[in-house]
Image (cartoon, rainbow, N blue to C red):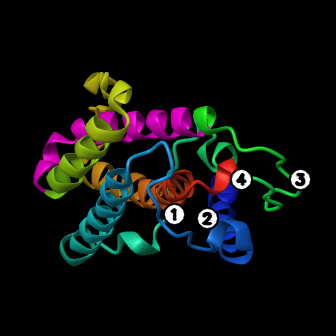
């Protein structure tokens, strides 16, 4: 299993960078069902996650060189793949916006639960939590049903292990947030309705 994690991140980045349907930016227009402000909220969240990882690098250890811990209970990357995307090896004929939005909301919910439970590091994650909550309230309000006990750190983990896990989860959230930003921009652009 650790070997799979070691190869998963580079493979995911290679896929994102080499697949033109996923790696290209799309223009933002107001034709999509998601408000244009959702694009802005998602971009701000991504910047905050990146800033937090940089702060952790300065004060703790280099999070950016660690493996990522992704939320594997959702299928956001495949559910939010653009129409006629060939990245997964099969051509996706249609874009299912409902499935994409549901997966994004479930991801946001998962990361909110985890980060809310990080009481030892609340000063580090407070800005990320604030921006995450803004995105959830304004664009995915149904995802706000939070059970903080699910994301709580194990009492058996020492401080170093909790910081290490926080770094890995934040890195995973950063990668997933890139996917979410692209999907929200894609839906907002109206490209999926053409």
Numbered disc in front, either 3 or 2: 3
- The number of numbered badges drawn on the structure is 4
The quadrant in which residue 127 appears is bottom left
Residue found 56% across the figure and 72% down from its top: 25
Left or right, residue 121 beside residue 182? left
For the residues marked 4 and 1, what is the alpha-carbon distance in whole angstroms?
Answer: 38 Å
Considering every residue shown, the one lying at the far left of the view is: 123
For the residues marked 3 and 1, what is the alpha-carbon distance in whole angstroms?
Answer: 28 Å
For the residues marked 1 and 2, what is the alpha-carbon distance in whole angstroms?
Answer: 7 Å
For the residues marked 3 and 4, what is the alpha-carbon distance in whole angstroms?
Answer: 20 Å
The quadrant in which residue 72 appears is top right
The local secondary structure at tag 4 comes to loop
Q: Which mark is residue 90?
A: 3
The local secondary structure at tag 2 comes to helix
For the residues marked 3 and 2, what is the alpha-carbon distance in whole angstroms?
Answer: 21 Å
Residue found 35% across the figure and 57% down from its top: 164
Residue extent of the magenta highlight: 100-123
Mark 4 nearby-residue class (10 Å; few <14, some 14–19, many ≥20): few
* Residue 26 visible in image: yes
Considering every residue shown, the one lying at the far right of the view is: 90
Q: Who comes first in sequence, dot 3 or dot 4?
A: 3
Q: Which mark is residue 194?
A: 4
Report the residue marked by disc 1: 67
In front here: 51 or 182? 182
């Amino acid at each position: 299993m650790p070997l799979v994690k070691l190869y998963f991140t580079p493979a995911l980045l290679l896929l994102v960078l080499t697949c033109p349907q996923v790696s290209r930016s799309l223009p933002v227009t107001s034709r999509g069902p998601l408000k244009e402000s959702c694009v802005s909220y998602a971009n701000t969240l991504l910047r905050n996650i990146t800033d937090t990882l940089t702060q952790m690098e300065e004060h703790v250890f280099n999070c950016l060189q660690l493996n990522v811990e992704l939320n594997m209970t959702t299928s956001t990357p495949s559910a939010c793949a653009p129409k006629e995307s060939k990245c997964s090896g099969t051509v996706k004929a249609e874009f299912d916006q409902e499935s994409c939005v549901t997966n994004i909301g479930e991801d946001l919910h998962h990361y909110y639960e985890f980060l809310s439970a990080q009481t030892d590091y609340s000063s580090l994650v407070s800005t990320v939590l604030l921006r995450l909550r803004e995105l959830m309230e304004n664009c995915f309000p149904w995802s706000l049903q939070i059970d903080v006990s699910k994301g709580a750190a194990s009492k058996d983990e020492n401080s170093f292990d909790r910081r290490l896990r926080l770094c890995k989860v934040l890195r995973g959230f950063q990668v997933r947030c890139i996917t979410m930003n692209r999907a929200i921009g894609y839906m907002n652009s109206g490209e999926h309705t053409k």
